[in-house]
Each structure stands twice: as structure tokens, then as C-alpha cells.
Amino acid sequence: MLNLQPLFRPESIAVIGVSLTNDRHPANVIFNKAHLRSPVKVFAVNPKGGEIQGQSVYPTVSDIPQSVDLAIIAVRSEHAPDVLDECIRAGVGGATIISGGFAEVGRQDLQDRMVTSARKSEFPFIGPNCLGIYAPPQVDTFFLPAERMVRPEPGNVALVSQSGGVLVDQLVKFANEGVGLSKAISIGNKALINELDLLEFLIKDQDTRVIAFYIEGFGKNQGREFVQAAGRCPKPIVVLKAGKTPGGQRAISSHTASLAGDYTVFSAVLAQYGLVEAKNEFEMLSFCESLSYYNRSFDGNIGIISPSGGHAALAVDVCAGHGLSVPELSEPVQKNIKDRLSTSVRGIATLRNPIDLTGSAVDRDFAVAAEGLSRAKEVDAVIVLLLPYSPGISSDLGARLSQMFRGTGKPLVAYVPHLEKYRMLIEGFEFNQIPVSSSIEGAVLMVEALRRCRPC
């Protein structure tokens, strides 16, 4: 079995293919980021030798005066097999091959040469035709300038993607939503290391709780092996599959030379094995955020709390669209909540479910309603819709509701418009391990993920 540790936790890195004249070359971008922003030792390699950023440039990786854990290969495709062989001879631990120009453009021969050498020597490599690995703080092989890179906070979600572009877009979305990442891996042509290999690695990775895949296609029989292994995984898995249409399948073939396969069959198999399929990038984000906080499933009965009847009605419609139920609360539950509401709200609030507290509600009213739903047998999870501009609520409400639900066994999900002005309210939830969505649709998707994910 291939040892992937050098790829993700290297102490030394060699960037092969740096240019002595073009500082915007992908290899130079990677070298500069690693040299200036990474805690590992970094070496530059170019056949001409020389100097860059005050550092020696070595003609080959074998000339580097110490052992190298990870080689980042960014050379012309016709040179890549020889460079890979040199890395193997030099005892490098593994490689990320950034270079393109292989099976995706008909040069299967070059790709096969590298795979043959790597398998013979049990040498792990990611790629080719990829961005590689982002595993802060030690590894960032993405050839994106540091000032343009959007980095999510450290977290427990790992993203694996065939497409580097889709992966970078997800990083932006995750950062904007406040979802933290343990690792982000662009695998490109996945000539050697594929989704199954990374699944097995990430299952054992203590920093990862949720594993998400953007998949374009598989080689022969690889899809079946992946789904079967994923079905045995003790961690939640989210899958976004491209190639749902004939046009999308043609695009996949030209992108990473993969076989898209029959999407309908693949989707049915994912559901059969208890995996969570995201239909689009928005769903993937919501699913990952929810599953990164909660490790449970439920039947799909939702309680909704809102200061706005319109927002409550919209939430009910979205729930219905996803097959989630918003059941009417029993008379005793309604009475228990009503009796403890503020006098200014008690006579005008609607308590059947959804609970519409009206714009006159204060923190205490939300707390009373939340406590009532936390005990109500009719609901399995609660969505609270908060409008931060409501005059009666404070920035502490998120923390107050979150602490109330800890230990109740019921998931709580919040909707709060994501603006910096409302950051304290949002952080009150997030600091207490409660997911917050910037849209009603996203909040509903968060509870939908829990219903569809089998218990872990």
C-alpha cells in the first residue's frame, strides 16, 4: 500500500521546473509561497542551476544536499517521466505532478510511463494535470498567487476534486460561509492515486471528520469499488457528480480523460449505500457544513422558529420541496410555550409550527420557543430564522440558543444573513458548534443532509 504521509506532512519540498527568467511561471509561484509562507524547507530545481530569491537552484533533485519528502513537478509533459524517475532514484517520498499534457490530450503513453515507474517503486504521486494539495500549514502546491488565494479557516472537512477550478471555487465558498477545511486535494487525471486511495487515507486522518468528493468519472470498475468502500466508511461522505447529461459527459472526457458512466445508476447506488449526494456546489457546501457539526440522522420532522411569517412560510415550502415535514405541535406543547412568552408577544404569536414570534419578539421569546421545541416529540430538528435587524433581539442570542440545545440530542440549524455587521450573532452559533446558513434554502439543506446520511 502506498504511503501518502510525505504528500501531506512533508518536512522538505523540492519544486522542480522553476524558471530563472519568468517569476510568474507556476513553479515559481509555488516556490515563492512555500519559501515565504511555509514552515518546511524548500528547494528549487532547474537543469541550469543558479539562484532564486537568494536560494541555490539545484540542477536535479539528486543534487539537493538533504532528503526530500515531497517533489512538486511542473515541467513540460515530455520531461515529466524522466524527472519522476530521478525523484525515485533520489529517494524522494512522493510527488505532486502539476504539469498537463498527458492522457487528457491523448498522451496516454507519457502517463503510463510514470504510472509504471511509480508502481514498481511504490512511489506515490498526485496528478498529473492538477493543482495538487492544500494542507495548511505545511503544503500548498496550488499555483495561485498568495494575494489571490482565498483560504478557509482550519476545520474538519476534506475536499477531493478532479477539477482544480471547482476546488478553488469551493474554497472561496467555504471561506465565505465560515466552513473550515482540513485538506483540499486536486487529483486531475488521477493516474496513480485516485478517490479510493484518498478515501482510505482520510478515514484514518484525525483532522478530518467529513469527506467530500467532486467526481467527473472513473476508470473501469473503479466506481463500484469506490462506492463499496465509501459505504463502509465511518465518516460522512458527500459526493458531487458531474456528467449528468451527454454534453457534460463529453466535457469530462476532454478534461481529465475519465469515463463519466451512467449518472442515474451511480446516483441510485450512492443512496443505496447511505452516501449524501449533492446536486450542485451550493448543496455540497450546506451538506459539508451541517455534517461537520452533527454526526447523527433523523426522520425528517422539522420545527421552525421565526420572527417573520413570510420567512416561516418560505421555509415550510422549501422543506416540502425536499420531502421534509413541518408537523403541527400538540396543544400541550403550544400552551407550554405560550404561557412563558412575553406579554407583548403572547397574544399575537402563531405557535402551531412554524412558530411565528412576530417582529416584537425579544431574546427570551426565542429561548422559550427553542426550549419548547427541544422537548417536543413531534420534531427531530429545529431551524431558527433570525433577522438581525429585528429590534428586540441582541447579538448574544446565537450563543444563548446554541447552549440551550447542547446535550438535547436534537440538531439546531440557524439562518442569519451573512454580513459583517451581524458577525457577533453568527459567531455565537459557530463558536458553540451550530451551523449557520446565509439563506433559508441552505438551512433546510443542512437538515436534509442529516436525514439522508446514515448513522456513523
Image (spheres, grey):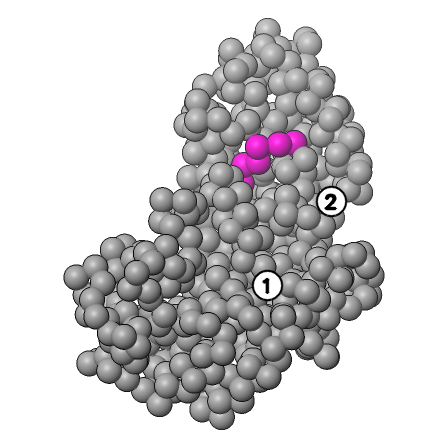
Residue 388 location (% of width, % of height): 52, 20
Furthest toward the top, the residue is 344
Mark 1, secondary structure of its residue: loop
Mark 1 = which residue?
162
In this view of the protein, can residue 235 be seen by the observer? no
Q: Amino acid at mark 1?
A: Gln
Report the front residue among 391 and 124: 124
Furthest toward the bottom, the residue is 120
- Marks 1 & 2, CB-CB < 8 Å contact: no
Residue 34 location (% of width, % of height): 30, 60
From which residue to which does the magenta span run? Answer: 435-440
Residue 368 location (% of width, % of height): 57, 24
Residue 415, quarter of picture = top right
Report the front residue among 267 and 88: 88
- Residue depicted at x 76% and y 62%: 249
Residue 224, quarter of picture = bottom right
- Residue depicted at x 67% and y 42%: 445
Q: Mark on residue 300?
A: 2
Report the front residue among 253 and 136: 253
Q: Is residue 436 magenta?
A: yes
Q: Is residue 403 left or right of residue 336?
A: left
Residue 407 location (% of width, % of height): 51, 44
Q: Mark on residue 402?
A: none
Q: Amino acid at mark 2?
A: Gly
Q: Residues within 10 Å of mark 2 (few under 14, many from 20)?
A: many
Q: Is residue 333 left or right of residue 166?
A: right
